[in-house]
Image (cartoon, rainbow, N blue to C red):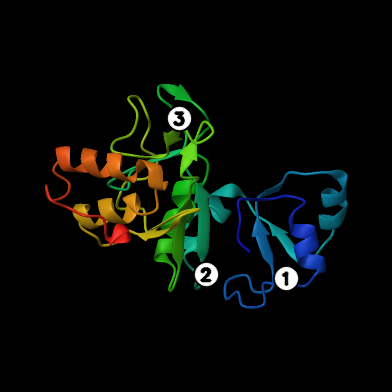
Amino acid sequence: MHSHYITDNIIPLIEEGVLTCRKKNYHPEKILTSFALGTNKLYKFIDNNPFIEFFPSDYVCNPRYIGMNKKMVSINSARQIDLTGQVNAATEGYSFYSGLGETIDFMRGSAFSKGGKPIIIIPSTLRNGEKSRIVPHLDEGAGILLSRGDVHYVVTEWGVAYLHGKTIRERVLELICIAHPKFRQSLLDEAKKLNYVFTDQMLPCDE
């Protein structure tokens, strides 16, 4: 485990032998982090615990060091993603929802890693299913936290899209196929208007 911060969730994973760090090649058999955020139970658990090492954020979140972990898997969330793969994770239109955080660092670090996987996870909808989080283009004022070149895997409850090295048309089809089914046709129609796909394009997931 190599993470910007840790919470109480690590305790049962360690106690049950799920989280061992035995396969780590960089800081082997150690959890590497920069801060802890949780209850007194967590703080007592990490106090003088040799399994957990703390370093400054500029070390833990440095893509060069993150990438030294083989098969590094980085999982980050997003608020919205457009059909080309651009990710908004920090704004709601012109309003800031959060800061930049360490998302870019870990996405790029895991991309540098031998066998690594940078992953974006996102629910397919918001507002009780009324709106798709996969959109033809980001909302006006939305900040692009990750460029389309940074995004490799996108996961929703409907599947996985692999975007790295794909053309715009291929990216569009991959993302529409993991959008909620009730929005897929409208997304395809918008993609045609934007000339992202052929005018007679069919969705491979519907064939």
User: Which residue is tagged 2?
Assistant: 69
For image coordinates 47% across by 34% down, the residue present is 90
Whether residue 52 sits left or right of residue 206 in the image: it is right
Mark 1 and 2 residues: CB-CB less than 8 Å, in contact?
A: no
Kindly state the secondary structure of the residue where label 2 is placed.
Answer: loop
Distance of label 1 from label 3 (alpha carbons): 35 Å
Whether residue 132 sits left or right of residue 62 in the image: it is left
User: Which residue is tagged 3?
Assistant: 91
- Depicted 92 relative to depicted 202: above or below: above
User: Which residue is tagged 1?
Assistant: 18
Identified by mark 2, the residue type is: Asn
Residue 26, percent from left and from top = 57, 71
Residue 68, percent from left and from top = 49, 69
For image coordinates 51% across by 67% down, the residue present is 72
Which is more N-terminal, label 2 or label 3? 2
Q: Nearer the viewer, mark 3 or mark 2?
A: 3
Which is more N-terminal, label 2 or label 1? 1
Kindly state the secondary structure of the residue where label 3 is placed.
Answer: strand
Q: Which of the pair 188/107 is nearer the observer?
A: 188
Distance of label 1 from label 2 (alpha carbons): 19 Å
Query: How many residues crowd around disc 2 within 10 Å: few (fewer than 14), some, or many (20 or more)?
Result: many
Whether residue 143 is visible here, answered yes or no, is yes
Which is more N-terminal, label 3 or label 1? 1
- Depicted 30 relative to depicted 33: above or below: below
Residue 84, percent from left and from top = 27, 47
Whether residue 154 sits left or right of residue 21 in the image: it is left
Q: Which of the pair 139/11 is nearer the observer?
A: 139
Kindly state the secondary structure of the residue where label 1 is placed.
Answer: loop
